[in-house]
Amino acid sequence: MGGLVTVQMDEQLARDAAAAARARVAAVTGGADALVEAVRVRVGRIGAGTVVAQLNAEVNGRRIRVQETAADLGEALDRLADGLRRRITAVVAGWSPRPWPRRGRGRGLAAATAPAPDAPRPLAEVPCGAESSSIVRRKRVGLVRCSPDAAARTMDAMDFDIHLFADPVTGTDAVVYRVGPTGYRLARTAAAGPPLRPAVPFTLSPCGAPELTEEQAVARLSAAELPFLFFAHPATRRGRVLYRRFDGRLGLIEAAS
């Protein structure tokens, strides 16, 4: 069951693209065996070619997010609709670990060939120049205290590749992220043992997050061509995630004090 679909379009895209986005989403939500509300779709371009489509919604009261890229608008919207259909099915059926890697992802990311223990998939293409080393978005968040299992479920529901949270058992800031061989990895700001009886097939980072300044983190991420990097503030030891945006520039998520 679906309701109002709000669509925000990039000015470069045709005016009738909003109608196409609404139609794709309505075709999924209209026949869904779930209550789908507060649907918001954003569509834009990266440079002259790649189309990015993002959808946020609530399915039976649970927040979900889907984000896809493609070479053209029609393919991006098709992938978005397919992703929404899968997410609704997952919410209705109940969460289970997702396979890795996902096929047809369309994000321009290479296979899992990470060169470092806490390094996820490298980008297939990373823009060069000063812009690729610029932090253009900063976000401070109050971290949710939850188990690694719950953090993994949130990460999947929101279509993230990494999720920052507070681990109540160890009292540390932590991340779960998508990487091989099991598809889920757990890292903390301080080294700790594996969670007790997890439902998620985690691999565990053996070391705590590196203490880095922003400049050091940017240099490490850029040198290794990583899509994101989990590190700790040298003074506070609070967790931070530096990540590569679709436009090649950087964003920073940090735990609020």
Image (cartoon, grey):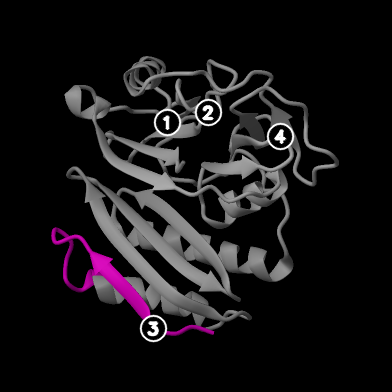
Which residue is denoted by mark 3 in the rendering? Answer: 4
Nearer-N-terminus badge (4/3):
3
Q: Residue at x 14, y 61 (%)?
A: 11
Give residue 214's position: percent from left, percent from top. Answer: 35, 24
Q: Determine contact: label 1, label 3, CB under 8 Å.
A: no
Q: Earlier in the sequence, mark 2 or mark 1?
A: 2
User: Where does the magenta region start and end?
Assistant: 1-17
Residue topped by disc 4: 170
Mark 1 lies on residue: 227
Q: Nearer the viewer, mark 1 or mark 4?
A: 4
Q: Main secondary structure of the magenta part?
A: loop
Q: Quadrant of residue 117?
A: top right
Closer to the chain start, of discs 4 and 2, is 2
Of badges 4 and 2, the one in the foreground is: 4
Circles 1 and 4, Cβ within 8 Å, touching? The answer is no
Asked whether, in this view, residue 36 is left or right of residue 42, the answer is right
Q: Amino acid at mark 4?
A: Thr
| Rendered residue at 65%/33% (across/down) | 185
Tag 4: Cα neighbours inside 10 Å, few (<14), some, or many (≥20)? some
Label ID, residue 120: 2
Q: Which mark is residue 136?
A: none
- Per the image, label 1 sits on a secondary structure element best described as loop
Whether pointer 2 and pointer 1 mark residues with C-beta atoms closer than 8 Å, the reply is yes
- Nearest to the eye among marks 4 and 3: give it: 4
Residue 25 rendering spot, x and y as whole percentages = 42, 73
Q: Residue 8: percent from the left, percent from the top?
A: 26, 67
Q: Quick check: 208 above or below 75?
A: above
